[in-house]
Amino acid sequence: MATFLYRLGRRAFRRRGLVVLLWVAVLVGAGVASSAAPAPPEDSFSMPGTESQKAFDLLDEQFPAASAEGATARVVIRAPEGAKISDAAGKDRVQDLVADLRAGPQVASVDDPFKADAVSKDGTTAYATVTYKVNAMELTDEARDSLTAATDGAREGGYTVETGGDAVVAEQEMGGTAELIGIGVAAIVLLLTFGSLVAAGMPLLSAIIGVGIGISAIGALGSTLELSATTSTLAMMIGLAVAIDYALFIVSRYRAEIAEGRSPEEAAGRAVGTAGSAVVFAGLTVVVALAGLAIVNIPILTKMGLAAAATVGIAVLIALTLTPALLGFAGKRALSRKDRKAPAGRQAAARPKLGTRWARFVQRRPVTVLLTAVLGLGVIAVPAASMELGLPDEGSSAPDTTQRKAYDLLSESFGAGFNGPFMIAVDARDAADPEAAADTVSERITGLGKAAAVTPASFNKEGDTAVLTVMPKTGPSDVATESLVHDIRSLSGDIEADTGATMLVTGATAMTIDFSQTLDDALVPYLALVVGLAFLLLMLVFRSVLVPLKAALGFLLSVAAALGAVVAVFQWGWLADLFGVDQPGPIMSMMPIFMIGVVFGLAMDYEVFLVTRMREAYVHGQSAAESVTTGFTHGGRVVAAAAIIMISVFSGFILENDAMIKMMGFGLAIAVLFDAFVVRMAIVPAVLALLGTKAWWLPTWLDRVLPNVDVEGEKLHRELGDTAAPAKPAREPETAGV
């Protein structure tokens, strides 16, 4: 592989104009195709095989008139202190509000609170439900402005008016401020790392082109492959991250080759042949982690994972071809002015780098460093054992938002369970008496004594399918509410036996419970698939059993610590003010599996880039201890720079108002921090120091079976006539304390 990539790099360097032109043409073509393509489909959420989804499918089939899925807004109005909505003045105000709401564009219907029994028992609060003809994604600015104008007008005279529902969800645009902050910090870090504007600009330019092609392709194929607008969210985040990383490592290796006296073309070829090999396998681990999301069997996650994996593939191709082409234009200007003036080999005689000094320190005290790092991450991981999963609702919104205020008003006036009702679908097509079956369902649920209310059954036109609404006594995210869902579902067997009717529980709260359970069930298989396949890939790269095992265990430790930190901040409320957490609560259900997929890919990036250089030095004749030092000398600073860039990109999302995005940004940033600076920078050299030559042990039979992909460039160096090095370096006895 190294030989092939070496030739590819040199060819791209020589034909740099053509290569750049081709990639620009691809970017323009993808952009034109995206702009000409039909609008992407609306976001759809389904969970095949779950009871909630079966119930939704049944209601969609049997109640076609109610399946439009238009956006809704729930407008809550409360009378001034000492007055009531049921007074004459209050009724007039409500009627005026309803009239203004009905006059808005795209409105299908507005329920009158006095006709829909939507007035609280104390007469102080009422709510009107606005249903639109289109979903929330298709609502126009005029429709939203009309809703805002109607509620603002109703506030005169001391009335409190707040609005909730998907029609008024604040828009959170991924790809805005957060990405700009990340790119800005990346530019600064790259400039400090390379000391050259040219060198700093190449990874950024490569990343922008790669992500631009990926996102445009998703837009162009959106309607054909049913990729919604949000499918590009993960692709944008991960594509930006890995594209900068991959170009960064190739440019760094190019500069090292130039410093050793190579010509620019030769340096580009060697950089792609060595660092490029690591890029290929690092990219494969990320693709495996993202494509593995398909195992969860939630279509939206599968599409997001595959789209992001495709973007990573584009980033790898960009790094292997466009980056050496850009180096062709840069030449020696990729070096800092100081390095351009210095004679070749000067750096070897300079004061040891920080990475070199750190590696030597760890090798002198491997046990102390290892125990400190493992125990530290272990302590931070403790809160993860108390993690409670759920999905964010309007109760977790910031206290100053109208959605949160509407949520609180409804809870105070109608009960905590009002914001989390269940729908009970009763399929009585096989029942002798459908009405009796529905009555039985209502009686059995009421008999549990845990529901605040159960509405009368509503039948379809054929009279063989009914729907009931159950109002719990507790809020949507309360443990008692989840318990009630399970209790109701446990009645289905007896009800079917007694009446012949099938009962299914659905609704937003039930969907949340099923979603969490689906992700929980998929977590272990997903881990086994991703870690197992990556273990095999890393065995190919490192020709070792213990190094991949150490990489996987270190990753699990860093993810556990990151989840512990997320629980401490977002569930327990520690340092909540510092991170802008307005309402501590359950952790987003998809957070653990999402973090595993994303962080695993990035963690293996750092592992491959750092340890491949060690393996290369070891294969070329250095001792196990010397190879660790060499790896940190050449790769430590660059890995640290890449990690800082990623931490900055993800930290930008902490500034967002949306609780879900804030949690994702914090979790990913802290996970990269732990993995890059604790696991890869401390645990890895400590373990390798303790293992010595045993780290590179591979059973003879396995060595014969595994194909030799030559990531370390052994064949390449022999072909180029470099100083001969034994193919199988001497396994001299070493001690951990060397």
Image (spheres, rainbow, N blue to C red):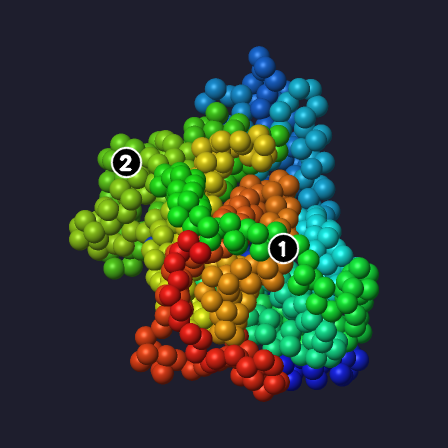
Residue 392 place in picture, x, y as percent: 49, 42
Q: Name the residue tied to disc 2.
A: 446
Above or below for 492 versus 236: above
User: Where residue 259 is drawn, which disc sits there?
Assistant: none
Mark 1 or mark 2, which is nearer the start of the sequence? 1
Q: Nearer the viewer, mark 2 or mark 1?
A: 1
Q: Nearer the viewer, residue 625 or 682?
A: 625
Residue 230 place in picture, x, y as percent: 59, 58
| Residue at horizontal 62 percent and vertical 85 percent from the top | 720
Q: Nearer the viewer, residue 32 or 291?
A: 291
Q: Quadrant of the N terminus?
A: bottom right
Q: Nearer the viewer, residue 628 or 116?
A: 628
Q: Name the residue tied to disc 1.
A: 352
Kindly tell me whether residue 579 is visible in this rendering: yes
Residue 134 place in picture, x, y as percent: 61, 54
| Residue at horizontal 52 percent and vertical 29 percent from the top | 408
| Residue at horizontal 68 percent and vertical 44 percent from the top | 144
In the picture as drawn, the residue positioned furthest to the top comes out as 82
Above or below for 631 versus 156: below
Q: State if disc 1 and disc 2 touch (CB < 8 Å).
A: no
